[in-house]
Image (cartoon, rainbow, N blue to C red):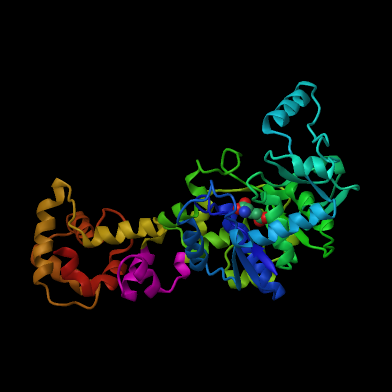
């Protein structure tokens, strides 16, 4: 079982989508199911509606899941496992107040040493625990030995018991911490490979420590994906519009291109342009670079353009607001200038909208417009042009400048003959 475990706490970040995508690919490659687990345990940070948004986005990108869980429904298991650890004396109740802990943390800072839990509550007598009515957390005892993590991308690392520390697994409100909920759920779902963002790497030894304390010895594989940097070399954050999957879609980057790009960056791939289906055949977690990936919107636009070129004209036509493959073909003519659906829509809409004509061409424009409205249907551009020349007497730039605006919606663009080819059945509508 593989799993994708997003938190419904904000817009989906491209880093999350990349994690989802790699999980999808690996689940297909290994022929193992993918679990979608919505990590909604942190009630204060949950945002209403984000869960539905995650489901819709994954569906849009064709990332399927065979199993689905809301982490909050697993609370009974988290509590049962915490009880078991208490019972086995692998965890203990901790009555240290936040103020006390803060003071000790400050003192450690002052002394320039790393803060570690000092074991105050580790050996309380049962009576001291039972008689104490104060709120308490549950801490797991730090392991007695180092924990090694083998990561497919980052290689081997080892963590000393003090680095893992006796950390909190249940808060005073009886809800599990992220590490505990995550470790228990991964164990109960029999997860075999965990692919997630590098920001979770330091959690991994803690989660392994939880598994070991629970007597779970299945060897889980890990792959932590390096972060994605913006063009200033900083981690892509909410402040970068392009970090939001929703924003990219609204800007007219298509799912096929976004996926292609997220597989390409920080990776060695046999070619630059590919479909998800291609990628599933050659994808290898081992070729992902250890260094951060760099996000470059111009490169994404280049890839988007290539996918738009490959798109079925009928589908492209729907994306620009029509249901005729001829309009899809027309849109493709603009792909030298436009690189996104938004830019293409603007080009197509300019053709079908009232035109703004510079004064010098206004008269000519009106004459050509009237002639076109009265014209019979011509199957080819040359005949249409001959008709216009014959009736207007225009030639050279006096003909072409206003004609381009009339038919093409702008002063520069694709060849007139090509435009006409795809627009001839819409001519009266275009010039009306
Ligand atoms: N819920 C975590 C997040 O959205 C992911 C946890 C995990 O993959 O282990 O960052």
Give whichever of 312, 396 is nearer the camera: 312
Residue at image point 84% right, 57% down: 212
Q: Is residue 56 left or right of residue 87?
A: left
Q: What residue appears at the point 72 percent right and 59 percent down from the top-left corner? A: 80
Residue 357 is a magenta residue: no
On-image quarter of the N terminus? bottom right
Ligand 1 visible in quadrant: bottom right
Residue toward you, 376 or 27: 27
* Residue 116 percent coordinates (x, y): 80, 35
Is 332 magenta? The answer is: yes
What segment is highlighted magenta in the picture? 308-333
The secondary structure that most of the magenta stretch takes on is helix
Residue shown at the point (80%, 38%) measured from the top left: 121
Q: Quadrant of residue 350?
A: bottom left
In which quarter of the view is residue 416 placed? bottom left
Asked whether residue 393 is in view, the answer is no
In depth, the one of 429 and 68 nearer the eye is: 68
How many numbered badges does the structure rendering display? 0
97 vs 47, left or right, is right
Q: Position of residue 328 (x, y in %)?
A: 35, 70
Give residue 75's position: percent from left, percent from top.
64, 58
Residue 108, above or below 323: above
Position of residue 20 in the picture relative to residue 345 (left or right): right
């Amino acid at each position: 079982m593989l799993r994708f475990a997003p938190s419904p706490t904000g817009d989906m970040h491209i880093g999350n989508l990349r994690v989802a995508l790699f999980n999808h690919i690996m689940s297909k490659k290994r022929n193992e199911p993918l679990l979608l687990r919505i990590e909604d345990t942190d009630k204060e940070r949950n945002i209403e509606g984000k869960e539905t948004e995650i489901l819709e986005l994954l569906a849009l990108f064709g990332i399927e899941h065979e199993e689905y869980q809301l982490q909050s429904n697993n609370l009974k298991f988290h509590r049962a496992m915490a009880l078991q650890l208490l019972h086995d004396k692998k965890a203990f109740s901790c009555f240290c107040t936040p103020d006390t802990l803060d003071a000790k943390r400050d003192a450690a800072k002052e002394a320039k040493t790393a803060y570690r839990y000092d074991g105050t509550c580790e050996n309380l007598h049962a009576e001291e625990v039972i008689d104490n009515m104060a709120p308490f957390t549950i801490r797991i005892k730090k392991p007695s030995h180092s924990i090694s993590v083998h990561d497919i991308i980052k290689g081997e690392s080892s963590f000393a018991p003090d680095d893992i520390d006796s950390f909190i697994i249940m808060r005073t409100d009886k809800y599990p911490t992220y590490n505990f909920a995550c470790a228990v759920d991964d164990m109960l779902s029999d997860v075999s490979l965990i692919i997630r963002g590098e920001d979770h790497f330091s959690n991994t030894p803690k989660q392994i420590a939880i598994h070991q304390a629970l007597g779970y010895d299945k060897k889980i594989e890990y792959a932590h994906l390096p972060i994605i940097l913006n063009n200033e070399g900083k981690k892509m954050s909410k402040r970068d519009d392009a970090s939001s999957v929703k924003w990219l879609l609204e800007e007219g980057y298509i799912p096929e291109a976004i996926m292609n790009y997220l597989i390409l960056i920080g990776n060695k791939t046999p070619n630059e342009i590919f479909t998800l289906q291609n990628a599933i055949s050659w994808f290898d977690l081992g070729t992902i670079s250890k260094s951060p990936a760099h996000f470059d919107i111009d490169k994404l636009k280049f890839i988007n353009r290539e996918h738009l070129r490959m798109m079925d004209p009928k589908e492209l036509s729907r994306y620009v607001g029509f249901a005729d493959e001829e309009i899809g073909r027309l849109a493709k003519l603009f792909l030298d200038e436009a690189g996104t659906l938004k830019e293409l829509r603007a080009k197509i809409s300019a053709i079908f909208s009232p035109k703004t004509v510079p004064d010098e061409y206004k008269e000519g424009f009106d004459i050509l417009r009237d002639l076109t409205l009265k014209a019979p249907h011509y199957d080819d551009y040359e005949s249409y042009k001959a008709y216009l020349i014959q009736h207007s007497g225009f030639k050279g730039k006096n003909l072409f400048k206003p004609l381009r605006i009339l038919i093409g919606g702008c002063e520069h663009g694709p060849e007139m003959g090509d435009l006409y080819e795809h627009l001839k059945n819409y001519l009266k509508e275009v010039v009306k």
